[in-house]
């Protein structure tokens, strides 16, 4: 059998030889003491890439979002999040559990959009008090949809008018920028804070950042320590992230073309329901018509193609730098074979 084609997530990528070389040769210090030059270089480059003053390197996207909420909100304050946000569904209820922050959700529609009026209506000024509105871009549980600048701007204005801040969970913000044919700075111009990940489509093994004003980041720093996120010779990880930022942003459009091709191929297979027009970035969500989704996922895995199911009732395939165009064609062939085996069962 050929090598496994792992489309469970873009988090599964492994560092290639050039990235490993950058890690092996990184100049490091002790970042908790504040003297790791590679971490400092990464934080500067990351802040610049999204047009913010400062950045803080953290182990995960979950910690970056948690730090954002713990810094924007005091105990008893409220954060507004999308009903399909990663913060609400996949981050272990961190901000409520650890910071006494309440999460109030506003609806994400089928394509991940949030109505500005819903945000305005949800913001509260008394007790509880809304101190931050969170947007996710790309919108993972809504097919990896890219949320346009105009929507980001309107929601930022609504938040700011009510005295709240805007935090963007931009785990895959460079995928969004590529899909919208803009740059991350433009897309994030109205955001107060932004988190993004090196360990997803950018292909680094570990790491995310929280970015924002220098004052905000200095307030977040002691909380990172409190959460156990202070890392020592983390320049080794930062070197991989820096390599990713320098070499793997431009190529994200390849992953997105592969996702489109995958969606088109899957759409022609009886029993699979996919709309290629809804594929904005590197995710393809598949629904089923007359086929059992769990049995299909298992049949596909037997054929060497792995997919995941973060949203019940659908299957997700995510393209990334470890799967090329030939791998995508193979995934389509094996999907057809898996679907046929179940139709004939
Ligand atoms: N998402 C993972 C899973 O947790 C679902 C994935 O495979 O897509 N924000 C967004 C929008 C994310 O998609 C993720 C990870 C995170 C934050 C958290 O990042 P990590 O896993 O680094 O904590």
Image: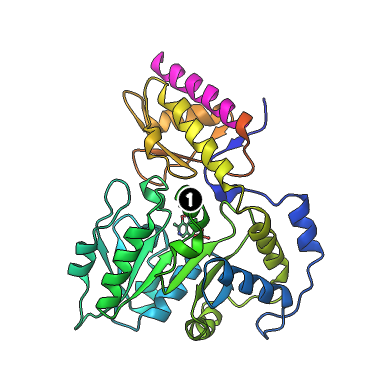
Q: Residues within 10 Å of mark 1 (few under 14, many from 20)?
A: few
Quadrant where the N terminus is found in the figure:
top right
User: SS for tag 1?
Assistant: loop
Mark 1 close to ligand 1, CB under 8 Å: no
Q: Residue furthest right?
A: 25
Q: Is residue 3 left or right of residue 284?
A: right
* Mark 1, residue position: 181
Residue 61 seen from this side: no
Q: Is residue 275 left or right of residue 3?
A: left
Instruction: Residue 6: give x, y in percent of width and height.
Output: 58, 39
Instruction: Residue 232: give x, y in percent of width and height.
Output: 69, 77
- In the rendered view, would you say 194 is above or below 280? below
- In the rendered view, would you say 303 is above or below 196? above
Instruction: Residue 124: give x, y in percent of width and height.
Output: 20, 76
Report the magenta stretch's main SS. helix
Look at 63% across and 60% down and name the residue there. Answer: 245
Between 166 and 287, the residue placed more toward the observer is: 166
- In the rendered view, would you say 147 is above or below 1? below
Quadrant where the C terminus is found in the figure:
top left
Look at 26% across and 63% down and name the residue there. Answer: 105
Region in magenta: 327-345
Q: Is residue 156 magenta?
A: no
Instruction: Residue 275: give x, y in percent of width and height.
Output: 36, 33
Labels in figure, total: 1
């Amino acid at each position: 059998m050929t090598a496994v084609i792992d489309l469970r997530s873009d988090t599964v990528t492994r560092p290639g030889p050039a990235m490993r070389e950058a890690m092996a040769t990184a100049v490091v210090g002790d970042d908790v003491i504040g003297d790791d030059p590679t971490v400092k270089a990464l934080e500067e480059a990351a802040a610049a890439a999204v047009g913010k003053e400062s950045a803080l390197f953290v182990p995960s996207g979950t910690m970056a979002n948690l730090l954002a909420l713990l810094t924007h909100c005091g105990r008893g304050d409220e954060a507004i999040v999308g009903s399909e946000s990663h913060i609400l569904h996949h981050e272990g209820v961190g901000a409520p559990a650890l910071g006494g922050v309440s999460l109030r959700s506003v609806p994400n529609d089928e394509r991940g959009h949030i109505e500005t009026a819903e945000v305005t209506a949800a913001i509260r000024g008394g007790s509880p008090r809304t101190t931050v509105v969170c947007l996710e871009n790309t919108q993972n549980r809504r097919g990896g949809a890219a949320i346009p600048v105009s929507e980001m701007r309107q929601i930022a204005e609504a938040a700011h008018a009510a005295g709240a801040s805007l935090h963007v969970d931009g785990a895959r913000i460079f995928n969004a920028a590529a899909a919208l044919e803009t740059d991350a700075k433009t897309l994030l111009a109205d955001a107060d804070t932004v988190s993004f990940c090196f360990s997803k489509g950018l292909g680094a093994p570990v790491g995310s950042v929280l970015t924002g004003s220098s004052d905000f980041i200095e307030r977040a720093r002691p909380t990172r320590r409190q959460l156990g996120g202070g890392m020592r010779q983390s320049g080794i990880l930062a070197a991989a992230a820096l390599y990713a930022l320098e070499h793997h942003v431009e190529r994200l459009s390849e992953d997105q073309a592969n996702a489109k091709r995958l969606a088109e191929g899957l759409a022609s297979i009886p029993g699979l329901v996919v709309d290629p027009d809804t594929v904005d970035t590197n995710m393809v969500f598949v629904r089923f018509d007359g086929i059992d989704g769990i049995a299909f996922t298992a049949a596909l895995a037997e054929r060497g193609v792995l997919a995941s199911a973060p949203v019940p009732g659908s299957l997700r395939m995510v393209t990334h730098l470890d799967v090329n165009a030939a791998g995508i064609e193979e995934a389509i062939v094996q999907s057809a074979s898996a679907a046929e085996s179940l139709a004939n069962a």
